[in-house]
Image (cartoon, grey):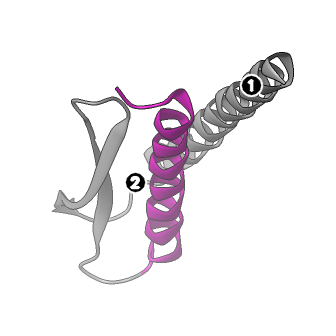
Amino acid sequence: MTSVSSIALSGMQAAQAALDSSAHNIANVSTPAFRRQEVIQTTQNSGGVATSLGLSATEGPALEPDLVSQLQAKNAFLANLAVFMTSNQMAGALLDKKV
C-alpha cells in the first residue's frame, strides 16, 4: 500500500504536468500546424496517478480548454498539497506521542 504522502505527491506531479502542457499550448497558439499537447492520467494499482503526454487529433489552438485546464491544475495542486501537508502533520503528531 502506498502512503498518503506519495499519493498526494503523484497528484501534485500530475497537476504540474497539466499546467506545463496548457502553458505550452498557449505559448504555441500562433505556430502553424501546431497540435496541442494533452495530458493523459492513469490510475496506479498501488494508488496515485501516472501521466503521459499525447497530441491532439486536430491541428489548431483551443484557448478555452487550455485556460480551464490551468485553473483545474492549480486547484488540483493546492488540494493535493493540503493532503500532503496534513499527512506530514499527522505523522509528526504520531511521532510526538510515541516519544
What residue is shown at x 21% (from left), y 60% (from top)? 54
Query: What secondary structure characterizes most of the magenta part?
Result: helix
- Mark nearer the N terminus (2 vs 1): 2
Q: Position of residue 58 (x, y in %)?
A: 17, 59
- For image coordinates 54% across by 35% down, the residue present is 8
Q: Which mark is residue 66?
A: none
Badge 1: residue crowd in 10 Å (few <14, some 14–19, many ≥20): some
User: Tag on residue 86?
Assistant: 1
Which disc, if any, is residue 62?
2
Q: Is residue 44 left or right of residue 18?
A: left
Q: Amino acid at mark 1?
A: Thr
Q: Magenta includes 3?
A: yes
Q: Quadrant of residue 5?
A: top right
Mark 2: secondary structure: loop
Report which quarter residue 28 is drawn in.
bottom left
- In this rendering, is residue 82 above or below 32? above
Q: Is residue 42 magenta?
A: no
* Residue at the image position 58 percent from the left and 34 percent from the top: 76
Of residues 54 and 15, the one drawn nearer to the viewer in this rendering: 15
Magenta region: which residues? 1-30
